[in-house]
Image (spheres, helix red, strand yellow):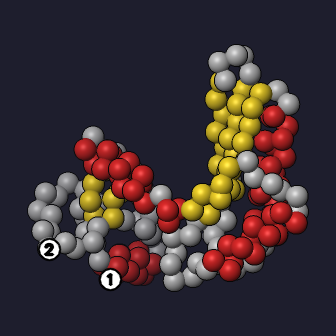
């Protein structure tokens, strides 16, 4: 889970913890454990400041995510007594926010557009596997300016220091 601590300005610490299940099936024991730890941590911190246990549903895998699975996960969390303070927030409903943040990163030169096709990425993985190397993105589009203008899809990648490792 995700954990964020910050000062509440009154000498007390505020905490926001997140549980982000993927609604592709039933809640499994590992997910329940993560949710329980985050929930208990938020409850403990609520005694000395403020806290929030946030439920953020990772429903961007359109091929496998279902509303039925999401409902099952929510039902299981409720059955376990893990009641969230915020949410459920759905990743699929926050696309405009993510596009805005990605554009900010692009504008600041902290990210770049990668136009590699799925086939090219698969070829990079296969080559690395054959050479018994680490499977990493090779930075093909990092410094290129000859971007396609045909509406081809792209991925926004962080512009890491040269020599930094980025996995595929």
Q: Which mark is residue 119?
A: 1
Identity of the residue drawn at 32% across and 44% down: 104
Q: Is residue 31 left or right of residue 133?
A: right
Disc 2 is placed on an element classified as loop
Q: For residue 74, what is the image quadrant?
A: bottom right
Disc 1 is placed on an element classified as helix
Residue that label 2 marks: 150
Q: How busy is the neighbourhood of tag 2: few (under 14 within 10 Å), some, or many (20 plus)?
A: few
Q: How busy is the neighbourhood of tag 1: few (under 14 within 10 Å), some, or many (20 plus)?
A: few
Does residue 109 sit above or below 23 in this rendering?
above
Residue 162 seen by the camera: no
Identity of the residue drawn at 35% across and 76% down: 121
Identity of the residue drawn at 70% across and 16% down: 10
Q: Is residue 152 left or right of residue 165?
A: left
| Residue 93 percent across, percent down from the top left | 49, 62
| Residue 60 percent across, percent down from the top left | 51, 70
Q: Earlier in the sequence, mark 2 or mark 1?
A: 1
Identity of the residue drawn at 57% across and 82% down: 64
The extreme top residue here reads 10
Q: Are marks 2 and 1 in contact (CB under 8 Å)?
A: no
Q: Quadrant of the C terminus?
A: bottom left
Q: Gap between marks 2 and 1, in whole Å?
A: 18 Å
Q: Nearer the viewer, residue 60 or 147?
A: 60
| Residue 31 percent across, percent down from the top left | 75, 65
| Residue 35 percent across, percent down from the top left | 77, 57
Total number of numbered discs in the rendering: 2
Residue 42 seen by the camera: yes
Q: Nearer the viewer, residue 161 or 131?
A: 161
């Amino acid at each position: 889970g995700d954990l964020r601590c910050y000062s509440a300005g009154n000498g007390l610490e505020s905490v926001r913890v997140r549980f982000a299940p993927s609604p592709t099936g039933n809640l499994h024991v590992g997910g329940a454990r993560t949710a329980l730890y985050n929930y208990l941590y938020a409850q403990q911190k609520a005694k000395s400041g403020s806290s929030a246990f946030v439920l953020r549903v990772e429903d961007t895998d359109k091929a496998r995510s279902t509303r039925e699975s999401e409902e099952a996960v929510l039902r299981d969390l409720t059955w376990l007594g893990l009641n969230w303070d915020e949410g459920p927030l759905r990743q699929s409903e926050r696309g405009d926010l993510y596009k805005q943040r990605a554009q900010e990163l692009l504008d600041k030169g902290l990210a770049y557009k990668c136009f590699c096709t799925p086939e090219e990425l698969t070829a990079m993985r296969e080559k690395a596997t054959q050479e018994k190397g680490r499977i990493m993105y090779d930075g093909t589009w990092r410094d290129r300016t000859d971007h396609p203008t045909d509406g081809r899809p792209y991925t926004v990648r962080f512009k890491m220091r040269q020599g930094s490792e980025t996995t595929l």
